[in-house]
Amino acid sequence: MYELLSFLARSKNRIRVLGSLDGFQTPTEISKKLKIQRSTVSRTIGELEEKELVKCLTPKERMGRLYSLTAQGKNIFEHLKKRG
């Protein structure tokens, strides 16, 4: 778990994207919500997916894919919130 916390702590965008995934959202929705480029959101989601913190709910879609937190992602985010 500490490796994941360290991984997240190295990027403010990772923490912001992880925290923005309440329910399910597309990268475009996250981009608008956080006011960061969609390409940055997509790259960040890919990094979070590799660590199994985020999952794609519609992997067969080419556009408008929906993403949500995994159970591990929710757990890690709760730890981050406690740290402040």
Image (spheres, rainbow, N blue to C red):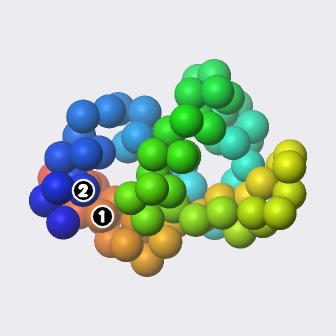
Seen in the image, is 72 located left or right of residue 24? left
Please state the horizontal and vertical placement of residue 79, each as a whole percent of the image: 23, 63
Work out whether 39 lies above or below 54: above
Give the residue pinned by disc 2.
4
- What is the quadrant of the N terminus in the image? bottom left
Residue 11 visible within the image: yes
Q: Quadrant of residue 25?
A: bottom right
Q: Residue at x 50, y 57 (%)?
A: 49
Q: Which mark is residue 76?
A: 1
- Location of residue 67 in the rendering, given as x and y in whole percent from the top left corner: 65, 59
Mark 2 vs mark 1, CA separation in Å: 8 Å
Of 79 and 51, the residue lying toward us: 51
Q: Earlier in the sequence, mark 2 or mark 1?
A: 2
Which residue occupies the foreground of this view, 82 or 54?
54
From the viewer's perspective, tell me whether residue 82 is left or right of residue 66: left
The numbered disc on residue 22 is: none
Helix, strand or loop for disc 2: helix
- Residue 81, position as x, y percentages in the image: 27, 55
**Marks 2 and 1 in Cβ contact (< 8 Å):** yes
Where is residue 16 shown, x and y percent of the image? Answer: 44, 40
* Crowdedness near tag 2: few (<14), some (14–19) or many (≥20) residues, C-alpha within 10 Å: some
Any part of residue 17 in sight? no
Callout 2, which amino acid?
Leu
Q: Point out the residue furthest to the bottom here.
A: 71
Question: Disc 1 on helix, strand or loop?
Answer: helix
Badge 1: how crowded within 10 Å, few (<14), some, or many (20+)?
some
What residue sits 67% from the left and 29% below the top? 38
Q: Amino acid at mark 1?
A: Ile
